[in-house]
Image (cartoon, rainbow, N blue to C red):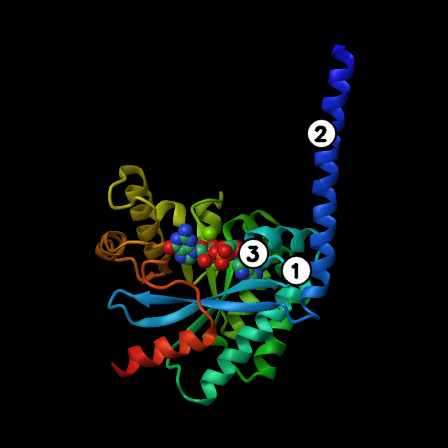
Amino acid sequence: EAKSAGRSRHCFYETGMQERVLERVQLETDLRQALDNDELLLHFQPQWDAQQKMVGAEALLRWQHPERGMVSPAAFIPLAEETRLILPIGEWVLRSACQWLSHWCKHGQMQGFVMSVNVSAVQFSQENFVGQVQSILQQFKVPAGALQLELTESMLAHDQQDIISKMSALKALGVLISLDDFGTGYSSLSYLHRLPIDQLKIDQSFVANIEHGEKNASLAESIISLGHNLGMEVIAEGVETKAQFDWLAAQECDLFQGFGLAKPMPMTDLLRQYQDVQTS
Ligand code: C2E
Ligand code: MG
Ligand code: MG
Ligand code: MG
């Protein structure tokens, strides 16, 4: 009696697992075709200074699946990394972002505008990564200083010598480097000091409740002064309310990004907002 109940539970569990495996295989099959089928696109989330001038944008990947609709990057980036599909996908992201930048440059619309692009650890660890960035910049005739690469703090745990030499080579090109999700990893301060990083991006988990929370408030405050002491620009992500913006601005946070200012949007909308702001 007990044994058969146990066995049927076991079967039930197996079926659930099988479904998850099939689901994953299906998603992987679809993802392999996503690039060829033109299902990937970029949305852009504006970044603002304390005077609420738009100074840049972060490119965020979107997958418009024919049946599933918009698939969130949180659902497919990890899979893309495991399968190394992130290599062609990441190159496509860099190319598309630079294509937009070159379009802006030609029309003389972007004085000092910086486009941030997320780079996965798998991508960054490719031997020819710096060469890839350089050739894309050349191909689209984009000034290197208009491109900022967002690396995550967790990546810094890998081969330190390799990271330092690649970051230095990128800096030599003139590309900017931002450290995304800062505060969630475990980078040592002495190591951070040795890296040519231009910007620290305070993780959104520290921005939440900042206007009431004691703990988040003091953490965010420390990150801002740490960044400034190291000569870095500091940006807060996930700014949802006016109170959060005001609090961060009072702590001399340099830049702001979040739903409270603007959500990620298609390029046409970003261009319209940028022009409206510049001419108003
Ligand atoms: P991230 O780089 O930390 O990007 C910020 C995420 O926070 C974005 O989610 C953005 O839409 C969301 N966000 C922005 N403002 C707010 C806010 O005020 N409140 C809340 N709750 N969320 C906000 P998204 O677009 O879903 O991207 C999730 C993650 O996927 C990104 O986190 C990044 O790690 C990854 N990702 C996105 N695009 C790419 C890409 O092209 N390449 C790689 N390697 N990863 C990417
Ligand atoms: Mg990012
Ligand atoms: Mg982030
Ligand atoms: Mg994040």
Image x and y of residue 147, in percent: 49, 72
Circle 3 — which element? helix
Residue 208: percent from left, percent from top: 34, 46
Q: Are marks 2 and 1 in contact (CB under 8 Å)?
A: no
| Image vertical order of residue 77 relative to residue 55, above or below | above
Residue at image coords 32%, 57%: 228
Secondary structure under tag 2 reads: helix
Residue density around tag 1, few if under 14, some if 14–19, many if 20 or more, within 10 Å: many
Q: Looking at numbered disc 3 in the image, what kind of residue is underneath it? A: Pro
Location of residue 33 in the rendering, given as x and y in whole percent from the top left corner: 72, 64
**In this rendering, the label closer to the viewer, 1 or 3:** 3
Residue linked to disc 1:
86
Q: Is residue 274 left or right of residue 77?
A: left
Q: Earlier in the sequence, mark 2 or mark 3?
A: 2
User: Can residue 202 be seen from the camera position used here?
Assistant: no
For label 2, count other residues whose C-alpha is less than 10 Å away and answer few (under 14), some (14-19) or many (20+).
few
Three-letter code for the amino acid on which mark 1 is drawn: Ile
Left or right: 54, with 162 as reference point: left
Is the residue indicated by label 1 positioned so its CB lies within 8 Å of ligand 1? yes
Q: Nearer the viewer, mark 2 or mark 1?
A: 2
Residue 13: mark:
2
Q: Is mark 3 within 8 Å of ligand 1?
A: yes
Label 2 sits on what residue type? Tyr
For the N terminus, the image quarter is: top right
Q: Nearer the viewer, residue 78 or 121?
A: 78
Calculate the distance from the C-alpha at mark 2 to the C-alpha at mark 1: 31 Å
Which residue was labeled with disc 3?
73
Tag 1 and tag 3, C-beta contact below 8 Å: no
Q: Residue at x 23, y 52 (%)?
A: 243
Q: Are marks 2 and 3 in contact (CB under 8 Å)?
A: no
Q: Nearer the viewer, residue 55 or 229?
A: 55
Q: Name the image quarter holding residue 86.
A: bottom right
